[in-house]
Image (cartoon, helix red, strand yellow):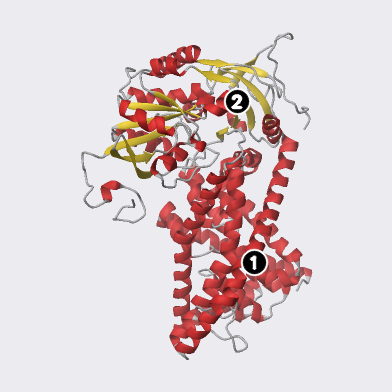
Amino acid sequence: MRCGECGRCFNIKHQPGNGESPDIKRVLLMGNPNVGKSVFFSHLTGTQALSSNYPGTTVGFTEGTMSYGGKYAHLIDVPGAYTLDPTNEAEEIARRMLEDGADIVIIVIDATALERNLVMALQVLEHGIPAVVALNMVDEARHRGILIDIPQLEAALGVPVVPTVAVTGQGLNSLTAKMSEARVSNLKHMSKEKRWQVIGEIIAKVQIVTHRHHTMMDMLEDASARPVIGVIMGIIVLLLGFAVIRFIGESIISYITDPVFEKLWIPVLDRLNAALGDSHLRSILIGQMVDGSINLEQSLGVLSTGVYVEFGMVLPYIIAFYAGLSFLEDFGYLPRLAVIFDALLHRFGIHGYAIIPTLLGFGCNVPGILATRVLESDRERFIAATLISVGIPCVSIQAMLSATLGKFGLIYIGSVYVIMFVVWMILGRIMHLTLSGFSPELIVEIPPYRIPSFSAWRNKIWFRIKDFLCEATPLVLLGILLVNILGNLGVMDWTARMLSPLFENMLGLPAAAAIPIVMGIFRKDIAMGLLIPLGLTAGQTLIAVVVLAMTFPCIATFIILWKELGWKRMLLSSAIMLAAALLTGSLLNMLFSIAHIK
Amino acid sequence: MNLLDIKNNDRAVIKSIPEGEAGERLEALGLRTGKEIQKISGMPFEGPITLMLDGRHFAVAHGIAEQIEVETVHENENASIKKSSAWPKFI
């Protein structure tokens, strides 16, 4: 049930009629990060919450409705917290949500790390709210030689304890059944030292750890933390990832999207074209004819090039990208990359964990920037978000660069990646040295490797694609519409004419190239369509593409930066972007003229 | 002796952790005074230290590892539970 107010969240209070109805219970789902709360949420409510095999997936919170014992309840997936003495934003949110009160708290505990999970569990129980405990991942614990005496644990905590395996749904029915037996624990508020003492006593009573031999997975886990093997594994994983993504992306394009566009979409556009005649509307929607017919790459209309680039070139790669990334995520590989990249990222004032949002940014910058919420401080978030939007080419930028530079050879495409990587590093270093504030250092738990569950993986890909289609795509298409209208009014030509001396002198590009670049700041697809017919040299195309790739991918990126950082920081970020793009372009131009590269 | 000083695969008991926010985060993860850990590896160029606590891996930045005081545990040669990594130290 989506709320009627914003249509996006599941907040029942927003729903007309449901108001403050006393029948509806407020149930909180709480626990440490990465214990499977979001999997519980999905199962209990039947709606989707994003889950991954690394801590911090849920930073905001998700709400949904569930039923137990014939009653409706309002279930809230609280962000994972190790403690209620907040050390980061997620923990702050968790503490506030508990203080807002609840009818029942479901405390999810990871059976493989009982001691640590009990800290937060005890803190919650001390609040005197009726609770049930879900002892999750009991299968994995058993596998690791950890045996837990459940009746003893129930006695010690004073609330019902239900063993579960959330990914398979095991134990969930008993959990909902036990919810009517939720009780207030007799544990009272205690000091930190006392709490550790109580936890020590509980562990001694309820847990037996037997020895077990190293498994293949353990060896793999150890290997990925080694300096040499770990880095080699990292490189192999990333290269293999790119190869798989390319294979899936190209397959979708040649077998599905291209045939659909040619056989179904073009005929529709042809009819529309004939119906509209020679009007402004036609040039906005369909664009110009290329050699007497509609060209999906160069006509530049909203419905021709706009729709084709978004759905025919970008979407297939978005699907492929998230299929690959989600697999690595659920497998538990990404936090290992954080360890490998920490030494480098540390020098940019962000710690290794920032590699996760950065990787997400290669798909679409918007979720990448949203994911910077896993970082602790505002300073880190600003640096990470700016670095993603300037230095990380999203799928549509990558599509643009291979379409424009492909004919000059792979070396040119490769150079764009290398140039952007260098810029990304220099910019990171400069921001770290100039921005005030403090960046906390890396302290993370590295989850064990797990074979991803197929259904969770599939749901996750779908969830992300849906997000891309609902959040980013409408804004991109709106941007294209706006730019086309401005283009028809002559605003774009005028701006480009004003800026052309800048382009000629600084970037060594003909005046005509100013139009694709100025427009390209808002819509990347046009760059390709407008740059190709200009007949630029390889060197000029490279400069134009680098400048375009470094400017923000689309209007959606501006909007998300505004939402996440506030307008002042968004403007600062945009200024950094413009300065970096123009400076890099000018330097390349100088370098090319010295080296006589055309 | 701190976490940087001990060798890979060494077991050690945590003697003290830094104060302030970093200490709180370590403690929240269960990395607190008195716990026995095993160092897994250290990344070059002042990269993070990976360690194992109760069968779980944790990564701690170089600068934080430096502030975690430890004391190595001398393992009994005959101890039945002797965990060592399957990987040679140099890789």
Disc 2 target residue: A143
Is residue A185 shown above or below A338?
above
- Percent of width and height locating residue A543: 66, 69
Quadrant in the picture for residue A231 = top right
Check the residue under mark 2 and report the chain it is in.
Answer: A
- Percent of width and height locating residue A413: 71, 64
* Residue closest to the eye, A78 or A67: A67
Is residue A34 shown above or below A409?
above
Disc 1 target residue: A255
Q: Residue at x 35, y 35 (%)?
A: A28
> What mark, if any, has residue A457 been given in the picture?
none
**Helix, strand or loop for disc 1:** helix
Check the residue under mark 1 and report the chain it is in.
Answer: A
Q: Residue at x 56, y 74 (%)?
A: A526
Residue A313 relative to residue A34: left or right: right
* Residue closest to the eye, A354 or A157: A157
Q: Mark 1 touching mark 2, by CB under 8 A? A: no
Q: Say what amino acid the circle numbered 1 marks.
A: Tyr
Answer whether residue A502 is visible to the viewer in this image.
no
**Helix, strand or loop for disc 2:** helix
Q: Residue furthest bottom?
A: A278
Q: CA distance from mark 1 to mark 2?
A: 43 Å
Is residue A569 shown above or below A213?
below
Q: Say what amino acid the circle numbered 2 marks.
A: His
Q: Residue at x 45, y 42 (%)?
A: A58
